[in-house]
Image (cartoon, grey):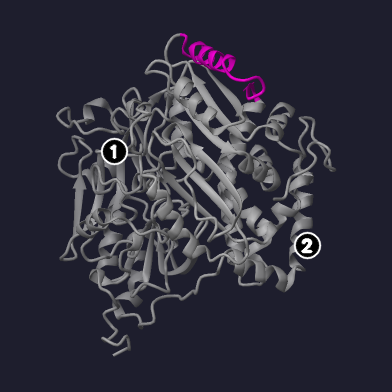
Amino acid sequence: WVRAEGGDSGRGEKSASGGYSLGAVLAVGAGGLMSGVIIGDKDMRLRRMTFPPNQLRACCDEPLTEAQKGLAGELAKVVGSGYVKNNKTQKGSRLGKGTSIAYVTPGTLEEAVKVLELCVKADVAIIPQGANTSLTGASVPRNGECDRPTVVIGLRRLSKIMPIGDGKRVLCFSGAGIFDLKEKMEKEYKRDSHSVLGSIFLNPTVAAGVAYGSGGTQIRKGPSWTERALFCKVKDDGSIELINTLGLKDGGDAIKFLDGRNELKPEDIDPTSKGACSWPNYGEVVRAVDDSKVARFNADTTGLDCCRSEGKVMILATMHDTFPIPEKSQLVWVACKDLSQAHAIKRQVALKSPDTMAKSCEYMNRETYNGVDRAGRILVKMIEIVGMQRLEPLWNLKLMIEMIPLPFTGIICDKFLYWFNNVIPQPLPQTLRDFGKEYDHHLLMELGEYSDGEVARLRGALDEFAAKQPEGSMTYHVCEGWEATRANLYRFVVAPAFRTYCIGVGMPGLSIDYALPKNFQEYPSLPEKEYPIRNRWVYSHFGCNVYHEDLVFTPDVDVEHAKHDIKKAVECTGGKLPAEHGHGTEYKAPKDMQERWKRTDPLNVMNPGVGGTSNYKLYADKPAHLGCCGHHH
């Protein structure tokens, strides 16, 4: 383990707030880029070891049909030539890289349906894509596996956000960003949106949240889920079926109705439509802390086919509940010696009762804390400088640089972030830095005034708990102003900091997410004898008992084999893996989920290969153009 030393003692030009100015950060960046150019073959070897490159093909080995050759032109007639890109290569946020024969971005729901019809007719594989923030590889083409060329339908232009009446419900087109939704509801309606994720600074789409069942940090809301949606399925005869459960008075044509609207009124809603717009009674679910079931997981088949569909349908629009914003809130950082103490705080404070319940309860262990300090300082600072809304283009620039076919480009950005990390001061205040040195377990609890006196009751419960603990076994600090901002950022940047750390130290890594039974209060036992783990970063949406682990292995470990054995170890505890990042190309979905996807997409046109299903037409065992011996006919 490499411990980060120092803190505010780093060298460089400082701003008045105690951080480094934009000029200093850019100067460091220039130095990092120049350094990266000369790192050569040594770092290329590290790149292969840590994150194996994909075998890239522009399409499958079969020649394109005439319909496939002419598809881009037909798509351009629908959306305009400026919204179709040929042979576009994309890299996933963490996994995957591939090239589509066409990347098309429709601007209306009508265009989206027409695009889907043309793609099905041309016999291509189709990936509906939001912001391409998926962490498990299924949001970009898999050219080496699929038996057809791929078209990516980018949905980001479908970005309408239409609050209904007083804003207690909102209808979102599939490309609406969750950060944009959060900002609009807060500023215009003083309401909280349904989904606040660790990746919110990348502005993932609302539809992607539904497609993955994303959960996020807030324990009162539950996963991104709804029974009110508009989405397309490809039927077994190749026709497109439009499923509409939105419950609008749309005159029988939801597409035309929504394309023609920029706002919705209460009278636009059919009062006979009773479908839920969020997971029912989720607060009660998580407060059942002695239950042996998990709170939420990716293979839960509850609800409409669009929920946790992982690209097997094309979502057009969804309706969601919004939530009250508390009158006031406090962020409390709690540090503990023992994991059992952290669980006791969750039970006795964060989930105390329906009217005394934290807004969020996040967890990280010592190794996560130290890892962010060693590899995440620059990212925290950049978010502070440019703001969340402007970070997405910088992130996309990073992905673009990593795709340049030169020896050092796949790792240069993360090498820079790692090498120059300590030039930036430690972002946390001295009190929290001391906590990091002295304690092994850390909770970030946001306390909200949802009912009169609720923050005071929560603080009272915390003080009562602390008074009963052995001296020095726990402590806490109320974060105010910039302290609260940086504490939250420190937790949110863990995932990108992990990649930076692995590339920085030249070690292979694995990221997993899983849900543990609500009554399970330990870490799962992993097969460390077979797969030696150098560092185990554990962080969690603690109130839900949903965990993320980033594992740094020794160089000789076969990470692919380790991944499957670790999945078995988690499941032996009664856990479910994955919990919220999706199966993607990394995990085989349970049989009932696979069967649901097959019923939903019987031709295997939509996102083929997801969750361990077949990559081939009709879910065949081998491509149709191969004979029984696997040779081309």
Q: Is residue 369 left or right of residue 578?
A: right
**Residue at which label 1 appears:** 226
Q: Answer whether residue 472 is magenta in the image.
A: yes
- Return the x and y of residue 619 as percentages of the image width and height: 25, 69
Structural distance between the alpha carbons of marks 1 and 2: 49 Å
Quadrant where the image shows the C terminus: bottom left
Please, which residue is most extreme toward the top here? 452
Residue situated in front as seen by the camera: 555 or 300 = 555
For badge 2, the amino acid type reads Ser
- Return the x and y of residue 320 as percentages of the image width and height: 32, 34
For badge 1, the amino acid type reads Thr
Q: Is residue 458 left or right of residue 234?
A: right
Q: Residue at x 62, y 37 (%)?
A: 490
Using the image, determine if residue 579 lies above or below residue 396.
Answer: above
Residue situated in front as seen by the camera: 576 or 75 = 576
**Residue at disc 2, secondary structure:** helix
- Return the x and y of residue 376 as percentages of the image width and height: 66, 45
Residue situated in front as seen by the camera: 482 or 299 = 299
**Residue at which label 2 appears:** 35
Label number found at residue 301: none
Which of pointers 1 and 2 lies earlier in the amino acid sequence?
2
Total numbered badges shown on the rendered structure: 2
Q: Quadrant of residue 269?
A: top left
Crowding near the residue tagged with mark 1, few <14, some 14–19, many ≥20 C-alpha atoms within 10 Å: many
Q: Residue at x 63, y 35 (%)?
A: 440
Using the image, determine if residue 388 lies above or below residue 633.
Answer: above
Crowding near the residue tagged with mark 2, few <14, some 14–19, many ≥20 C-alpha atoms within 10 Å: some
- Return the x and y of residue 447 as percentages of the image width and height: 51, 21
Q: Quadrant of residue 152?
A: bottom left
**Residue at disc 1, secondary structure:** loop
Please, which residue is most extreme toward the bottom here? 633
Residue segment shown in magenta? 453-481
